[in-house]
Amino acid sequence: MSRYWPFRLTGFGRCWSNWVAFLDRQEPGTTLALWRIACGLCLVGTIAAVVLAGAVPLLWLPPADGGYTQPATPWLFRQIGGVTPATVKGMVALTLIAGVLTAVGLGGRIAVLAALQGFLALMGLNSDATGGHDSVISNGLWLLVLSRSTETLSLDCRLRTGRWTSERPVPAWPRYLAIFQLVLIYWSTGLHKMSAAWTPAGGFSALYYILQQPTWQRWDMSWLAWLYPLTQLGTALTWVWEITAPLLLLALWYRATPQRPGLFRRLFNRINFRRLFVLMGVAVHVGIFVCLEVGPFSWIMLAFYICLYRPEEWRIGWR
């Protein structure tokens, strides 16, 4: 066995070196900046919707102060005296201000961290008033805390350089993690669709029945019975798209290494798999927004799509 050990060590060392080099990659901060703006706007929109609806007391205060349930007490509220009308209003104001600062890029990571902690504190008050979109927003903000997202397209950049843009490179791995998060969300969602309604055994009927749920639909959609075959096609396409989401990682790798040989690399690049994936995703989320009331889910998921494009692609597209 000892005679094979140097080869194993060499192979491990090569893999480790490649991994370190991969995580050490840097790029202009354009993509992360655009993603920061989108996440900040999603956060502000989520909190502002509650404020404008006059639902802050109902959702986040105890019954004695107008709420319908006894709220939990997240750690941040424990530090400021508990859940009271004054502390909740203060947390709402803090989160909105920090969200705006995140979007405009003032305050760097501190502003993003404040927005994240304020958002987590508010969402932790009432588990009945949260959804998967809140977790996606939180995950996005965490990655922005770890990144240098205000190097360009920000007030920080304007104050530092006198210009709105900068070519200073930033680590690319937060963008890679955002892409991985996006793929993981879709893939796990597809794997959890285990009912027969998502398969031929159930006639691909899931989408039709989802659109008939009164708690979710924006308006009466009983007329879809006349278009039932289209809902079956939508069910099948959505399920296949979700469970094959990991192929997007492969497609992005093939796109970044077009000079290498391989039949699948040429095929994926020829059909532009990323474009097909994005078009399907946009169609799905616009459809969800138009037909269903599920909060800011569509907008925060589409915000993650920004990370699928390298900074130079965004700049070429802008020009």
Image (cartoon, rainbow, N blue to C red):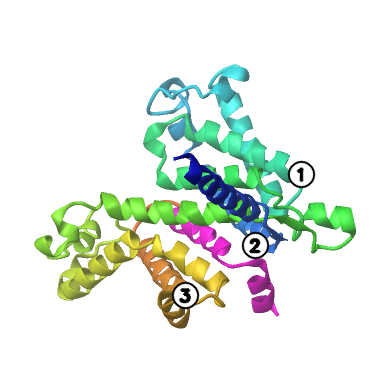
Q: Residue at x 60, y 34 (%)?
A: 117
In the figure, 45 relative to 309: above or below?
A: above
Label 2: which residue? 31
**Front: mark 3 or 1:** 3
Is residue 52 something that shows in the picture?
no
Say which amino acid is labelled 1: Gly
Q: Earlier in the sequence, mark 3 or mark 1?
A: 1
Chief secondary structure of the magenta portion: helix
Q: Look at the image and give the residue range highlighted in magenta.
A: 297-319
Find the residue positioned furthest to the front.
Answer: 3
Label 1: which residue? 107
Image coordinates for residue 258, horizontal then vertical, percent: 55, 76
79 with respect to 26 (left or right): left
Residue 287 in which image quadrant: bottom left
Say which amino acid is labelled 3: Arg
Image quarter where the C terminus lies is bottom right
In the figure, 203 relative to 129: above or below?
A: below
Q: Residue at x 57, y 70 (%)?
A: 256
In the drawing, what numbered circle is on residue 282? none
66 or 25: nearer the viewer? 25
Q: Is residue 109 magenta?
A: no
- Alpha-carbon span between mark 2 and mark 3: 17 Å
Q: Which element carries disc 1, helix, strand or loop?
A: loop
